[in-house]
Amino acid sequence: MSSITLTNVKKVYGEDVIIPDLNLVIEDGSFTVLVGPSGCGKSTTLRMIAGLEGPTSGNIYIDDQDVVNVAPGKRGIAMVFQNYALYPTMTVKQNIEFGLVNKKVPKAEREKLIKEVCEIVGLEKYLSRKPGQLSGGQRQRVALARAMVKKPKVFLMDEPLSNLDAKLRAAMRVELIQLHKRLGTTFIYVTHDQVEAMSMGDNIVLMDKGIIMQRSSPRDMYNDPQNVYTAQFIGTPPMNIVRDLLLDNYSIGFRPEKITLNPDAGEDMFRIKGHVMTKEHLGSEINYSITTEYGLVMAKLEQEVADDCDVMIGVDYANLYIFDQNDNRTELDANIKKALIAVSAQ
Amino acid sequence: MLSFSNVGTQAAKPRKKKKVKQKYRLGEQLAGYGLVAPAIILLCVFTIYPMLYLIYSSLFDGKLISKKRNFVGFENYEKLLTDSDFLRVISNTVVYSILLVAFTMVLAVLVAVWLNSKVTPRLNSLTQAAIFTPHIISLVSASMVFMWLMDPQIGFINSILTKLGLGKFPFLASPNTALISLVMVMVWKSVGYYSLLILAALQNIPPNIYEAAALDDTPKVRVFFRITLPMISPTVFFTTIVATISSFQVFDTVSLMTQGGPVNSTNTLVYYIYQYAFKYMKLGPAMAAGVILLVFVLVLTIIYFAFLGKKVHYQ
């Protein structure tokens, strides 16, 4: 039962400003994902919440308590690290038990808690092994068990799945979502992988250079990007942005999967002429890269057209996103629509 | 036609190939032996042969320069093991080693942990340089300086002790304090070197583990004993064995500072061997004592290799 509030948090390393001024409220019980490219400040934010690093200025609250001067071990949080950070000289059981012994939990209760947690993550058979004798996935489970056994108010996870292979990562993703539902605790999850962010979080915070670019649900992140950065970060391939087409440095965006190639003449669509350069078959879909007079456009469609041919790219006006000169989203109003119809190819 | 000739060549080929391969292998083998030969020859001439000769001649009586020798069997060993002087020498050596290694390792670990903590970065780097200096100073000069410092009458340390009203410490002059004085000098000389080795081990511990410990609300003392010490234990163990072996072979400090005295209180195994071989010219007992030293070192080495297999490996 804990919310986390960051107010005017600033973090500076030497002369580098990592986070200029961060304000963020993470609701109790949410699965919040901090996502962004490396160096965007997401890990630093997480480590400041954990207490492993202090903010240069600003306040961090867990519930209503200011925790800036509270030691990491006294904040009621648990953290899972990217490389797990297990104690290599201790067995799995000792690893899980370590925090409980520090809190002077009686032995009988410790045994009960360890048994409970190990059943959830499936570690019963490995309790007497050392981390060096476990596979990556098993180490990951030990790290999770060690966090869970403390019954923390908040779980912090710093790229916990990035050391696993693709198949195991997908499986652990589902397990973490289930774990969150089961525990109902606040999860804060850091990743650079937009697929992970979209599939796991109920609340995504997209960061760039220490600034929050957008904060919304996965659905809104995709359907309703507030700026060009968000539009291009989410989705593979990223949203097409066509500049120099409208006046006043306005640009338009449309997703590769929302394109129709060679639409019927009668349909009310925005059109650009292009030429198919390459075609990648992905199985269910085909990725086209198409050159136009405004630059390269990507399309991701089931529809198949011939290689190396001229095509007409069509996009419904409803699927167009308009960005202003500062790359922020703006309404597709009547004036802009008129301008679009004027430049649209016939 | 084509197919026929193919059959012929195919049948002949494998035999030819095999021969070539064998020849190549023999050449490769010879090259291998050739490459290790210099090392093997040096090892045999300067280590294996002297070792066997040592054991062989410990069974004889005789002087260093005389050619005439009598076979006496284990008489040299019997004499040594019933000689109270020799038993004193053994106990001196063991006490010296234990004290030296214990003080050195405990101090080295503590110094290394402090150097690694970087609480006072400037002082730390200064200390790191300063503490290594004794290791590169010649032992002869260091011994001279310490003999002056430790002089019971005019020594610097005693003059300070007297000024503080603590009375004089006899150091090398008394049989009760001579051995511990030697230990002090050697601790001073070797702490820097070993703490540097341990510092390297400390710096190899992933910082994440300490962060995990902080999140587990671990008290500092427990972090040291449950995380730091186990993580550096392979290095501590290795350095302990190396330090023990070298302390068993102590000669120069004894020879320079006390010549085994007063009253045999600092006479150690290697100095004893030196005395018998080159002062009293009695080769037999010296050789037998040499074999006993060999056994001590051998046992330590076996312990080291037995434990080496149990070293922790992670990721």
Image: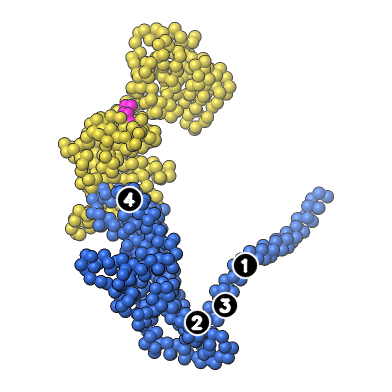
Chain colours: A yellow, B blue
Main SS of the magenta part reads strand
| Front residue of B9 and B213 | B213
Mark 4 and mark 2 in contact? Answer it, CB < 8 Å: no
Q: Which residue is mark 1?
A: B38
Chain letter of the residue beneath label 2 in the structure image: B
Mark 4 and mark 1 in contact? Answer it, CB < 8 Å: no
**Real-space Cα distance between discs 4 and 3?**
51 Å
Q: Which residues are magenta?
A: A210-214
Please tell me the numbered disc located at residue A17: none
Q: Amino acid at mark 4?
A: Leu
| Front residue of A273 and A251 | A251
Q: Residue at x 33, y 60 (%)?
A: B109
Measured as percent of width and height from the top left, residue B139 is found at 43, 67
Q: Which residue is mark 4?
A: B123
Q: Earlier in the sequence, mark 4 or mark 3?
A: 3
Dot 1 and dot 3 within a common chain: yes
Measured as percent of width and height from the top left, residue A335 is found at 36, 7
Q: Which residue is mark 3?
A: B49
Q: Amino acid at mark 3?
A: Tyr
Magenta-span inclusion, residue A211 = yes
Q: Residue at x 31, y 35 (%)?
A: A12
Describe residue B315's horizontal placement relative to residue A80 as left or right: right
Q: Local crowd at mark 3 within 10 Å, few (<14), some, or many (≥20)?
A: few
